[in-house]
Amino acid sequence: MFKKIVSIVSAATLGVCCLTGCGNQASEKNLEKITVAEVTHSVFYAPQYVAMSQGFFEEEGLEIDLVNTQGADKTMSALISEEADIGLMGPEASIYIYNQGEENYAVNFAQLTQCDGSFLVSREDIKDFSYEDLKGKEVLGGRAGGVPLMTFEYVLKQNGIKIGEDTSNGECNVRTDVQFGAMAGAFAAGEADFTTAFEPTASQLEKDGAGYVVASIGKDSGKIPYTAYSVTKSYMKDNKETLEKFTRALYKAQIWCKDATDQQIAEAIQPYFEDNTIDELIIVAQKYREIGAWCESPYFEKESLDNLMDVMESAGELDKRVDYDKIVDMSVVDEVMENK
């Protein structure tokens, strides 16, 4: 549970021992090396890998050491303990840390994705799907307290669907007992009527004949700052020039993705996803562009943070709302965009 994140951070040296590297761009050039801890390794973060593969970070004099922490709690631990310079995770982690009184809390300085990246997969091919179709059904929803689950349940409530275990009474039973990484396998094995899944898993379930994609959770939930880059207050204060270089490279990648074809994006990120074919990555690029998942600039809007907190409040996971200016600092983005 994210609300336990402070105790996790206090044991940060334990949490970061198992960081696994996703790529180390060793170079003989005189580059400034920065460590970026990503919450998971996902095609959902395509612009980041584009910035790496197209040399945009290197153009700015940066070498990226990318590590996969496999969890927002571990990403935040790496940040607070200074094992990582920059963290890529959901801003809800910054809210929890701020609300629990961490002095050197995390500040979000650039945004990467702007909506939920999961899709609803049905066991049956439902034409003209409506959320009414979930009444009396069972859904594999994800981890309790996680933003994918919170967002999905928010969409259900917005559509008047009652969540509960009594499916005989028309309630939708949203299960949280299956680990996120095991949901697709459990669904393919026959559990539940629906599951939520990110790409390329959702398309793979369709390809295998195990299910049918019937809705985009991100499209139906609206804009929220799903993943953003954050640093500690002290790092922000002492490393503005480095963060400007990083953000400039990210912005180049965001513009590149906006203008590129699905195939060009697939080819650019394929070195980081060797288990996926180009054709599979083309489908992923197409689907995420269709729902506007990737930000076209690194600017983090106040309205989107408010939407995220609405989702968290609806899920009962937010004790106190946080002022935008406390956990978001757009000074670096403003400098980069003014001088692009």
Image (cartoon, rainbow, N blue to C red):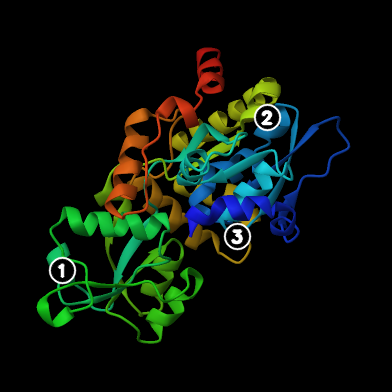
Distance from Cα at disc 1 to Cα at disc 2: 51 Å
Question: Residue 73: where, in percent of width, then height?
Answer: 57, 54
Q: Which residue is mark 1?
A: 127
In the image, what residue type sits under mark 1?
Lys
Q: Residue furthest right?
A: 28
**Does 58 sit above or below residue 83?**
above
Q: Name the residue at 35% across, 84% down.
A: 191
**Could you tell whether 52 is left or right of 100 in the image?**
right
Q: Which residue is mark 2?
A: 235
Nearest to the eye among marks 2 and 3: give it. Answer: 2
Residue nearest the observer in this picture, 163 or 261: 163
Q: Residue furthest bottom?
A: 190
Q: What secondary structure is marked by label 2?
A: helix
Distance from Cα at disc 1 to Cα at disc 3: 36 Å
Nearest to the eye among marks 1 and 3: give it. Answer: 3
Question: Residue 173: where, in percent of width, then height?
Answer: 25, 74
Residue nearest the observer in this picture, 75 or 270: 75
**Could you tell whether 336 is left or right of 325 in the image?**
right
Query: Visible in this render: residue 21?
Result: yes
Q: Name the residue at 60% across, 54% down.
A: 7
Q: What secondary structure is marked by label 3?
A: loop
Q: Earlier in the sequence, mark 1 or mark 2?
A: 1
Q: What secondary structure is marked by label 1?
A: loop
Per the rendering, the mark at residue 70 is 3
In the image, what residue type sits under mark 2?
Tyr
